Amino acid sequence: MTYHQEVCRLRFLLRLQPENEPFRIPFNNQHYLQGLIYRRIQRVDPSLSLRLHSPKIPKLFTYSLFMAEERKLAEDRSGLLGRKHGFFYFSTAVPEIAEAFITGLLEDPEVELWGERFTVEEVKALAEPERLSGRKFVTLSPVAVTTKRIQFGRLKSYDLSPTEPKFYELIRENLREKYIHIYGIKPPEDFEMRVLSAKPKRFEVKPGIFQTAWHLVFRAYGDEGLLRAGYIAGFGEKNSIGFGMVKVDGRRGT
């Protein structure tokens, strides 16, 4: 499945008005957003929702962590307390996914997440930077990269860190796979990533299943199409469960 380059750039900011203030934001909130995305897609396009549940279909979408305009740590340290609006970002290389998800939100703007109620107040399409190579990127959701290693005599999943060369090799290969699905042509090799700062964070992605991923500030260099594949569909893996979304740091002199 491939998608034409001229129609694959679809990125949104979604602002939600809370029913109550302050509102809770759990640290592990990706799977709640994943559920919201799939429910709204299923409402509008059940056949697309069914295809996206197939492990063989590239998802080619990603989203940020849930954030708030004002926030502080909860007293019990179980999460954050937010005020004013909540918001998150969503990006995809597939027009059908964007259309189904956004239409589903607008048709049914009342949202419940982790027991908190919100109303979708704004869906804003975002412009893309004209140039990506050489720019500074900041993660909106942390980058996950895993491999398999022998541990205690068994082959187990291992979460890589930016201190390991394999981390960058797998990010490059993942970008090349996305490039094939998006553009339908042989991917270039031209890619370099220089991490400026890195902070690990451990998430419970499913009950009892954890992922260590990395909040990063980095510069990326190389082919514009390859970098745009990461900007649109996420860097690293597990993008459709809330990892690897980035923004370009637009501050001058950075």
Image (tube, rainbow, N blue to C red):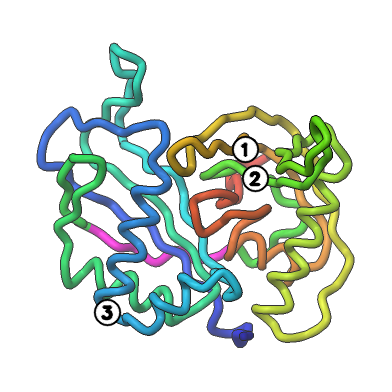
Residue 13 in picture, x, y percent from top left? 38, 57
Q: Of the residues shown, which amino acid type is indicated by label 2?
A: Ala
Instruction: Count every numbered label the image shows and give the total.
Output: 3
Q: Residue furthest top?
A: 75
* Residue at the image point whose x is 28% and y is 12% from the top: 75
Which residues fall within the magenta stretch?
122-128
Left or right: residue 185 versus residue 90 is right
The spot of residue 81 in percent (x, y) is 27, 26
Q: Report the residue marked by disc 1.
A: 213
Say if 152 sits above or below 98 in the image. above
Report the residue marked by disc 3. 44
Q: Measure how far apart labels 1 and 2 are at the Cα level.
A: 5 Å
Residue 124, percent from left and from top: 34, 63
Q: Position of residue 100 (x, y in %)?
A: 34, 77
Query: Of callouts 1 and 2, which one flags the residue occurring earlier in the amino acid sequence?
Result: 2
**Distance CA(mark 2)–CA(mark 3):** 30 Å
Q: Is residue 116 above or below residue 129?
A: above
Q: Locate residue 89: give its quadrant.
A: bottom left
How many other residues sit within 10 Å of disc 3, few (<14), some (14-19) or many (≥20)? some
| Labelled disc at residue 60 | none
Residue at disc 3, secondary structure: helix
* The N terminus sits in image quarter: bottom right
Q: Amino acid at mark 1?
A: Ala
Q: Is residue 240 left or right of residue 80?
A: right
The disc, 2 or 3, on the residue closer to the chain's N-terminal end is 3
Three-letter code for the amino acid on which mark 3 is drawn: Val
Rendered image: mark on residue 144: 2
Contact (Cβ within 8 Å) of mark 1 with mark 2: yes
Q: Residue at x 25, y 31 (%)?
A: 24
C-alpha separation, residue under disc 1 versus residue under disc 3: 32 Å
Is residue 111 visible in the rendered image? The answer is: yes
Q: Secondary structure at mark 2?
A: loop
